[in-house]
Image (tube, rainbow, N blue to C red):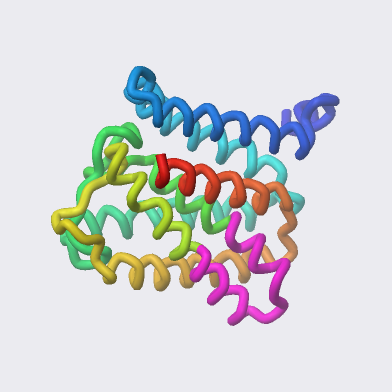
Amino acid sequence: MLDKIDSLPFVNQKNAFRLMLAMHVAGAIGLAVDETRELFQWLTPFNLLATAAIVLHFESEKGLKYGLFIILTFLIGFFIEVIGVSTGQIFGTYSYGETLGYKVLDVPLAIGLNWVVLIYATAQLSKTLFSSLIARVVMGAGLMTAIDYFIEPVAIAYDFWSWESAAIPLQNYAAWFLVSAVLHVLFQKLMPNSNNSLTIRLLYIQVGFFIVLNFI
């Protein structure tokens, strides 16, 4: 099935990049405009799902370890969030709104997928910059924490999630770094030869997306 999809002339990274860029531009505009905001909030989990499907498709080393990375990252990311929401002891006291879609144990399933995509993308970028495991893990976790910093104001404004306190606790960023570091070690151990340059371009798109929404 995947071979048949890959054989189609329009299935390539250039077109995938264009599609993801168009989706995020449309999303930024749709969320910023009062008349369309509710619709685009409803579409947000579908955007996340489509983005994940597109970017994960172009992995060069598909196989058992790739599947294991996706499943473990999803489960670890998701259940860390479940514990975090229920106890307030990991990231701080917060709760998820309705924008990210269907929830299990008060956490949207889309959050697990978001952990997969962001870990995968930041790991690819750190691989291009460093050769040592420690440097890759630290860089990857640092990128994850920086991305969360840009996401937070947008997430609060558009009902992705909300915090009990007025200020986002520093504990949140420390926890993001530590959890991300663990997941980056997992990636580097399971997928040392992974190659997917589309993920790096996705990072540029997503950072731009959240920066734009921060200033609208």
**The furthest residue to the front:** 215
Vertical placement of residue 37 versus 120, above or below: above
Q: Is residue 135 magenta?
A: yes
Seen at 47% across and 71% down, the residue is 182
Does the image show residue 76? no
Q: Position of residue 195 (x, y in %)?
A: 74, 56
For the C terminus, give its image quadrant: top left
For the N terminus, give its image quadrant: top right
- Looking at the image, residue 14 sits to the left or right of residue 64; the answer is right
Seen at 84% across and 29% down, the residue is 7
Q: Main secondary structure of the magenta part?
A: helix
- Looking at the image, residue 193 sits to the left or right of residue 163; the answer is right
Q: Position of residue 141 (x, y in %)?
A: 50, 69
- Which of the two residues, 17 or 9, is positioned nearer the viewer here? 17
- Which of the two residues, 175 or 167, is positioned nearer the viewer here? 167
Q: Position of residue 127 (x, y in %)?
A: 69, 68
Picture quadrant where residue 156 is located: top left
- Looking at the image, residue 37 sits to the left or right of residue 69; the answer is left
Picture quadrant where residue 51 is located: top right
- Which of the two residues, 10 or 106, is positioned nearer the viewer here? 10
Vertical placement of residue 193 versus 8, above or below: below
Does the image show residue 184? yes
Vertical placement of residue 72 versus 160, above or below: below
Picture quadrant where residue 205 is located: top right
Q: Position of residue 171 (x, y in %)?
A: 27, 70
Q: Is residue 3 magenta?
A: no
Q: Which segment did they paint magenta?
A: 121-143
Seen at 55% across and 47% down, the residue is 208
Counting the numbered discs, the total is 0
Seen at 57% across and 30% down, the residue is 23
